Image (cartoon, rainbow, N blue to C red):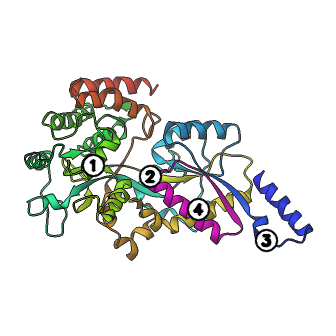
Amino acid sequence: MKTKIAKLAASAALILGLSSPAWAAVELEWWDFLAGGDGVRMKALIQQFNEEHPDIRIQGTTLEWGAPYYTKVRTAVAVGQGPDIMTYHLSRLPLALEEGVLSPISDADLGKAGLSRDDFFPAAIEAATGPDGQLMAVPFDIHAIVAYYNKTALQGSKWLDGEGNLTGIGSVEDLTELLSWAKDKGFSDPLSFQTEGGGGVWRMFYTLFRQQGGEFLTDGEVLAGDNLAKAARAIQIMADWRGAGLIPEQASYEASVALFSGGKAILHTNGVWEVPTFKDQAAAGTLGFDWFANEIPQLLDQPATWADSHAFAIPNDANMTAETRDAVLTVIGWMEKHSLDWAGAGHIPAYKPTVESAEYQALEPNATYASLAEHAAFDPRSKIAGVASPAYDAVDNLIAPAIHGYLTADEAAAQMKEQLQALMN
């Protein structure tokens, strides 16, 4: 419909003797969930695209992150009122497949965008692919948690190497030693992260779980075999830190960030998206110490870090014209090739040529923690997992209470298995 209106406008322009190319622009409705620094950068990219493409006009709308966004997408696509292009978390892909809200993206589509599957990190492409091998979205980034740290406080200690990176942390015991040392130095909450529940606890739990080689789902079974014990161990590690006063009590997301920037935590685990926060504070002179960020250290059996991807998706709309779809593919290709600007938000671009560029390699701390793209542990491929999923509910109702002593780690893991397994049927 939007393309038809644009063509009618173009015809009217010719009749009236007007020549502005804006009359003939393909209008694309864009939805995203990007707020804060992410939102600022994406709006700037949209503006730049529009300036460079008088034949295509993106009309952007930002909606509320999480469950409200995906509910809106599901209901709008069902009645044919969805956008032409939207951002999507790849952790939500299994549910999207069940709901039928996404249009598959063929290799020919990628070619029209000037892209190929080989342009992307394998973990991101795998997360964007359905069980039949069909690509369902185009990854834009890999965003994971990293270890932010107070370089000033660690200066001269055995945990900082000559290049200013974390060192000597190869086990849970090593990290606990560092945190205990920091506690003795006056840091009230040595390791800060969101401990009240939600995303912060899930990301830390899943990192510790996957570093044991844990598999959350095996042939449709939640925490099968020894995976239940691995989940309990991950919970117990966090509970032990809390019991020793090494992580904060019931810290909200915002409070966990403030504990680090306020000098009460020597380490802070959070998403790469907080890089701009600390850069801005340092530039404004309000941080009070030098900081940096590294990949989460390997504390257990193998390197692994919770990760997700923002991706571009095309809603499943049988009435979308070929002209509109081609314009969408043009947008996707352009965004990927300008993903260095997106990296300024702390993200690792999923488009490998950007990460391999000299410009990205000069971008810090991004270039230092880019190695985590090889160790990215995406959420389980299931409708019960991913952003705003039942797995996140289990964090709030079971894992966070266990960290704070209201349940044992074994009880929390067993109840999580029972509750989530019931939803698999």
Residue 53 % position (x, y): 66, 69
SS under mark 4: helix
Please tell me whether residue 249 is drawn above or below residue 207 in the rendered image. above
List the residue tagged with mark 1.
Answer: 269
The residue pinned by badge 2 equals: 309
Which of label 1 and label 3 is nearer to you? Answer: 3
**In the image, residue 173 lies at what x, y percent?**
11, 45
Q: Are marks 1 and 2 in contact (CB under 8 Å)?
A: no
The residue under the point 61% across, 42% down is 101
Q: Nearer the viewer, mark 3 or mark 2?
A: 3
Mark sitting earlier along the chain (2/4): 4
In this rendering, would 101 be left or right of 232?
right
Cα gap from disc 1 to disc 2, whole angstroms: 18 Å
Residue topped by disc 4? 46
> Dot 3 corresponds to which residue?
20
Q: What segment carries the magenta color?
A: 32-61
Q: Earlier in the sequence, mark 1 or mark 4?
A: 4
Question: Mark 2 Cα within 10 Å, few/some/many (few <14, many 20+)?
Answer: many
Considering every residue shown, the one lying at the far front of the view is 285
Q: Residue 84, percent across and down?
A: 66, 52
- Marks 1 and 2: which is nearer the front? 1
Which one is in front in this view, the residue at disc 2 or the one at disc 4? 4
Classify mark 1: helix, strand or loop: strand
Q: Alpha carbon of mark 1 to alpha carbon of mark 3: how far?
A: 51 Å
Which residue sits at x=58%, y=60%? 107
Q: Badges 1 and 4: C-beta atoms under 8 Å apart?
A: no
Q: For numbered disc 3, what is the local secondary structure? A: loop
